[in-house]
Image (tube, helix red, strand yellow):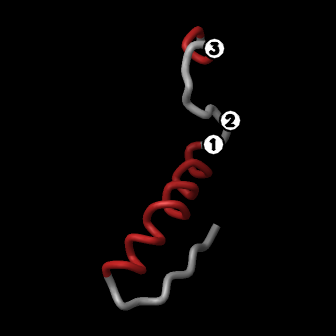
Amino acid sequence: MDYAKETNMSLIGVSHSASEYLVKETLMYDWFKENFDVDVTLIP
């Protein structure tokens, strides 16, 4: 993990499923709200 000290990305330690949820929460939620006339409920 030598790249960790060189990168300017935020690095957080979460499981794969937790990272998928973050993407859904931050990107997919807004996309569905903007493109479809549906109510969106995220289930963790």
Q: Which mark is residue 13?
A: 2
Kindly identify the residue that appears in the image at 57 percent across and 74 percent down: 42
Q: Height in image: 31 above or below 38? A: above
Task: Single out the mark in the foreground, 2 or 1.
Answer: 2
Mark 3 vs mark 2, foreground winner is 3
Structural crowding at the residue carrying mark 3, measured as other residues with C-alpha within 10 Å and reported as few (<14), some (14–19) or many (≥20): few
Viewer-proximal residue among 6 and 14: 6
Left-right relation of 4 to 27? right
Q: Residue at x 37, y 78 (%)?
A: 34
Q: Amino acid at mark 2?
A: Gly
The tag on residue 23 is none
**Which residue lies at the image location 45% right of the left edge and 71% below the top edge?**
30
Earlier along the polypeptide chain: callout 3 or callout 2?
Answer: 3
Give the total number of marks visible in the rendering.
Answer: 3
From what the image shows, is residue 3 above or below residue 27?
above
Helix, strand or loop at label 3? It is: helix
